[in-house]
C-alpha cells in the first residue's frame, strides 16, 4: 500500500532515509531516463534548493520511494538563490529559460513553489499534489507555483484547480516547460 509522508527539516531528520531515496529516484528519472545534465553524487540528484527548511512530499511503499515533490516558500533566500522559477526568470540558472515568466515571480511567505516532481507510478501523482496543497493550506498559504511540462498544468485542471500560466510554454534541449500558479480558496 502506498503511503504519503510530508517531511520538513530539520524537524523530521529521523526520516531522512526517505529523502535520500527520493533523491535517488530523481537521479533515475531526471538523469538516467530523461538525460538531463544535472549534478549527482552517489546515485542522488540534488541541487542548491535541497536545503534545510524545504519540505518534501514523498510517496512510498514501506521504505521504497515511488514518487515525490519538493515544496519551498517563495520568500526564502540562501546565498544568491531564492526558488527555481524566480531564479530562472532572473537568469541565475543556466539551462532554464529566463522567459519562463512574463513578469517577476512573487516573493511572499504565503506563496510556495512545488518542483522536482518525480514518479515511477503515475497513480500517485494526484495524491502527492492534493496532500501537498492540504499541507500548504494548513500553513495558511494562499497559493502555489508549479514548474513542469505543459501537461502538468492540464493535470491540475483535471484535479479541479484553476491554474494560471505565469508565462509562455518555453523550453530547451531538455524539453518544454510551463510555470503556473494555483491560488487557494
Image (cartoon, rainbow, N blue to C red):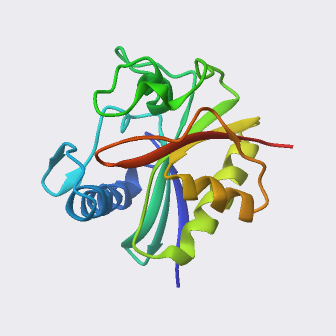
> For this view, does 6 lie left or right of residue 34?
right
Q: Quadrant of residue 31?
A: bottom left
Image: 147 above or below 85:
below
- Of the pair 115 and 13, the residue shown nearer to us: 115
Q: Residue furthest left?
A: 42
Which residue does the image show at 22% across and 44% down from the upper left? Answer: 38
- Of the pair 170 and 3, the residue shown nearer to us: 170
Q: Residue furthest bottom?
A: 1
Which residue does the image show at 36% across and 39% down from the upper left? Answer: 50
Q: Quadrant of residue 80?
A: top left
Image: 156 above or below 65:
above
Using the rendered image of the protein, determine whether residue 98 is visible from the camera's viewpoint: yes
**Residue 133 image point, x, y percent:** 69, 51
Q: Quadrant of residue 151?
A: bottom right
**Residue 109 image point, x, y percent:** 65, 24
- Of the pair 90 and 72, the residue shown nearer to us: 90
**Residue 77 image point, x, y percent:** 46, 18
Q: Which image quadrant: the C terminus? A: top right
Q: Residue furthest right?
A: 185
Which residue does the image show at 44% across and 17% down from the upper left? Answer: 90
Count of all numbered marks drawn on residues in the image:
0
Which residue does the image show at 35% across and 54% down from the upper left? Answer: 16
Image: 116 above or below 21:
above
Using the rendered image of the protein, determine whether residue 131 is visible from the camera's viewpoint: no
- Of the pair 182 and 78, the residue shown nearer to us: 182
> For this view, does 156 lie left or right of residue 150?
right
**Residue 37 image point, x, y percent:** 20, 45
Amino acid at each position: 500500500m502506498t503511503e504519503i509522508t510530508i517531511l520538513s527539516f530539520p524537524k523530521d531528520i529521523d526520516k531522512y532515509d526517505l529523502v535520500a531515496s527520493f533523491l535517488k529516484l530523481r537521479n533515475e528519472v531526471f538523469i538516467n531516463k530523461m538525460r538531463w545534465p544535472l549534478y549527482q553524487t552517489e546515485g542522488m540528484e540534488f541541487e542548491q534548493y535541497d536545503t534545510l527548511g524545504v519540505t518534501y512530499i514523498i510517496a512510498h511503499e514501506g521504505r521504497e520511494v515511488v514518487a515525490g515533490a519538493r515544496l519551498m516558500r517563495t520568500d526564502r533566500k540562501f546565498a544568491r538563490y531564492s526558488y527555481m522559477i524566480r531564479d530562472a526568470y532572473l537568469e541565475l540558472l543556466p539551462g532554464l529559460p529566463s522567459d519562463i515568466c512574463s513578469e517577476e515571480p512573487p516573493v511572499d511567505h504565503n506563496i510556495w513553489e512545488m518542483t522536482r516532481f518525480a514518479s515511477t507510478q503515475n497513480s500517485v501523482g494526484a495524491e502527492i499534489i492534493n496532500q501537498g496543497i492540504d499541507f500548504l493550506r494548513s500553513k495558511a498559504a494562499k497559493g502555489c507555483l508549479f514548474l513542469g511540462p505543459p501537461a502538468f498544468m492540464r493535470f491540475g485542471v483535471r484535479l479541479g484547480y484553476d491554474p494560471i500560466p505565469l508565462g509562455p510554454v518555453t523550453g530547451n534541449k531538455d524539453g518544454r516547460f510551463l510555470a503556473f500558479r494555483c491560488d487557494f480558496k
